[in-house]
Amino acid sequence: MRTDRLLHITLMAGAARALLCDVTRAAETARRIHRASRVCAAALGRGISGAAVLNAPRKGERLTLTFNGGGPAGALTIVSGPGVLKASIGDPSVELPLKPNGKLDVGGAIGREGRVIAVRDMGMKQPYIGQSALVSGEIAEDLAMYCTASEQQPTLCALGVRIGADGSASGAESVLAAGGLMIQPLPGCPEELLSALELRRELFADISAAIESESLESLAREFFGGLDPEILQEDSLEYRCDCGRDRMERALVAMGRGEIASMIEDQGGAELTCHFCGSAYSFTADQLGKLLALSKKS
Ligand SMILES: [Zn+2]
């Protein structure tokens, strides 16, 4: 059984780095949790791949990516970091017709009028927040533009999700393959390597089909043949939500006194559901009362 993982690769003795990941299982988990339509499952899977490759070189950081393009599916949010990899989308039921090229219309679902926002929490007081305008809402291009414009890091990015019949008797659909590739030149990268990578763009264009049929190692050899690819490290990945009662309590306190008081008065308690994993947390009026006292103090 394949597992989700990510390879850290260097090219030409460190002139550029490539991150290549298979997140098929995480994308399928996200599809199931959110009962997502095909186009929304593709958006979730591309987002998970993108956050995984973008955050991979930064050990210990928690990255939250939000794509907010004004489209019918609402905002796409992904969190990647130590012990967490999760995604949610505003309205996972939105479905759109295929694009003329036969691909799922992720850009139509997410929208193009808005921004991608990255919050990098390095465990310091203030997180780093970067943003850039969306290019197409297709996620990969938007992420490449974000890296180039906001982090001054030229980037090639390809992300893909394949959805189809899972081979069961019921003919149900599932994510067959999902993953991504991000390539970034490092300081001193020779011009020839940049143009060699540009010329290979086509090779990466159908990344999900490549991931479905081959191992990451053989893709690394195929994509980067002649560029001296070296696999430095492998990370294992897994869809994992890090919500918990304490996080929910903080969210309630942040809602403010008025909101908590009206929950006690109108509903005699509260039931909160995690947007990322669907876990439910219930709070009695007594428990809310204690949070009310806390929020008075703060
Ligand atoms: Zn959760």
Image (cartoon, grey):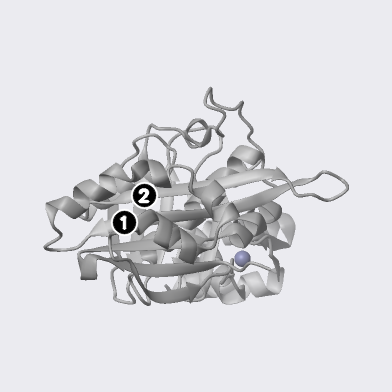
- From the image, tell me which residue sits under label 2: 157
Q: Are marks 1 and 2 in contact (CB under 8 Å)?
A: yes
* Residue closer to the observer: 279 or 4: 4
Whether the residue under disc 1 has CB within 8 Å of ligand 1 = no
| Residue located at (65% from left, 55% from top) | 28
- Residue at the outermost front position: 226
- First reached walking from the N terminus: tag 1 or tag 2: 2
Q: Which mark is residue 216?
A: none
Q: Reply above or below: 94 against 232.
A: above
Judge left or right: residue 185 versus residue 100. Answer: left
Q: CA distance from mark 1 to mark 2?
A: 6 Å
Residue 100 image point, x, y percent: 53, 22
Q: Which residue is mark 1?
A: 183
Query: Does residue 198 lie above or below 14 as drawn?
Result: above
Q: Amino acid under label 2?
A: Cys
Ligand 1's quadrant is bottom right
Q: Would residue 103 be found to the left or right of residue 173 on screen?
A: left
Please count the marks in the image. 2
Please say if 236 is above or below 272. below
Q: Residue furthest right?
A: 169
Task: Give amino acid for label 1.
Answer: Ile
Residue 214, image x, y percentages: 55, 58
